[in-house]
Amino acid sequence: MNASTDTSTVTSTTRTAVVTGAGSGIGRAVALELLRAGWRVALAGRRTRALDETAALAPGTDALAVRADVSSPDDVAALFTAVRDRFGRLDLLFNNAGTFGPGGVPVEDLDYDAWRHVVDTNLNGAFLCAQAAFRQMKEQDPQGGRIINNGSISAHTPRPHSVAYTATKHALTGLTKSLSLDGRPYRIACGQIDIGNAATDMTERMRSGILQANGELAVEPVMDVADVARTVRHMAELPLEANVQFATVLATNMPYVGRG
């Protein structure tokens, strides 16, 4: 058997995923979509109770809740060790954990600790998880796997007063491209999903009015987070010979095309 080309032992019912930020929002929706499709899923996040609540929404499935702060190298190492010990392999990392940081703060007033918190979570955390996943995917038999990074519309176009979030999301695009290139020899595919206005707690303010580039407040439409989850699942279940490099999924009428 050639480990570099044969994937016959990895079926839809034995695929294993790690989803970070799985305790709420997009992470929860994606984790549930994968669990209900027969994936084994490690639910990672900082709040154990929220992770347990996610698992309880998909009874009878194979979920592993692991408390982990993705900005901590020790937590990330323990997370991927737990996945290897429980499931034996890793087929997907959905790098989803993130924070917007303090909203509505002009760049000149942004506290450095707040900047660092966003960078540590959104960028450093994504790198640490991708690095750990890359190592495991490279070493396992059959070799390979997939990493999907959660970018954002802000990886393309910023909102006002979002310098930390926007900078990290632009950086994620570079991370995605580098991982995609470096993963080629090891059958590791990497893509990115850029999401606009999925209905979660993080986007609740869209419904009451949010600052636009022209200085006005406007209500923005949102979409069902389940539509995002289905898109991630589609990307995840492609054969490793195919990859969605970048996907943009957004509420149809949100002010993105031409924003600003």
Image (cartoon, grey):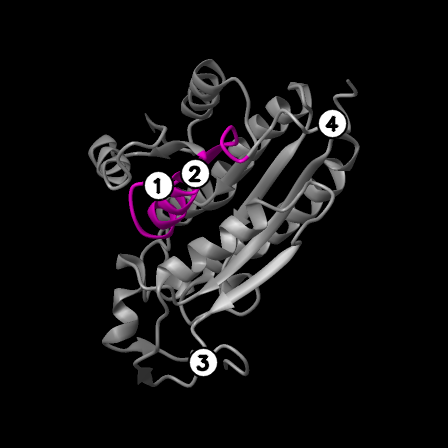
Circle 4 sits in a helix, a strand or a loop, which is it? loop
Q: Is residue 97 left or right of residue 154?
A: left
Residue named by callout 4? 6
* Three-letter amino acid code at the position of disc 2: Val
Circle 2 sits in a helix, a strand or a loop, which is it? strand
Q: Is residue 18 left or right of residue 6?
A: left
Whether the magenta-drawn stretch holds residue 15 is answered as yes
Residue named by callout 1? 22
Q: Earlier in the sequence, mark 1 or mark 4?
A: 4
Q: CA distance from mark 1 to mark 4?
A: 31 Å
Q: CA distance from mark 4 to mark 2?
A: 25 Å
Q: Are marks 1 and 3 in contact (CB under 8 Å)?
A: no
Q: Are marks 4 and 3 in contact (CB under 8 Å)?
A: no
- The mark lying in front, picked from 3 and 2, is 2
In depth, the one of 63 and 22 nearer the eye is 63
Q: Residues within 10 Å of mark 1 (few under 14, many from 20)?
A: many
Q: CA distance from mark 1 to mark 3?
A: 28 Å
Q: Earlier in the sequence, mark 4 or mark 3?
A: 4
Q: Are marks 1 and 4 in contact (CB under 8 Å)?
A: no
Q: CA distance from mark 3 to mark 2?
A: 29 Å
* Three-letter amino acid code at the position of disc 3: Pro
User: Where residue 33 sits in the image (x, y, percent)?
Assistant: 40, 47
Q: Are marks 1 and 2 in contact (CB under 8 Å)?
A: yes
Against 233, is 194 above or below?
Answer: below
User: Where residue 86 sits in the image (x, y, percent)?
Assistant: 43, 17
Residue named by callout 3? 255
- The mark lying in front, picked from 1 and 4, is 4
Circle 3 sits in a helix, a strand or a loop, which is it? loop
Which residue is rendered at x = 46% and y = 33% of the image? 18
Query: Magenta segment range?
Result: 12-39
Residue named by callout 2? 19
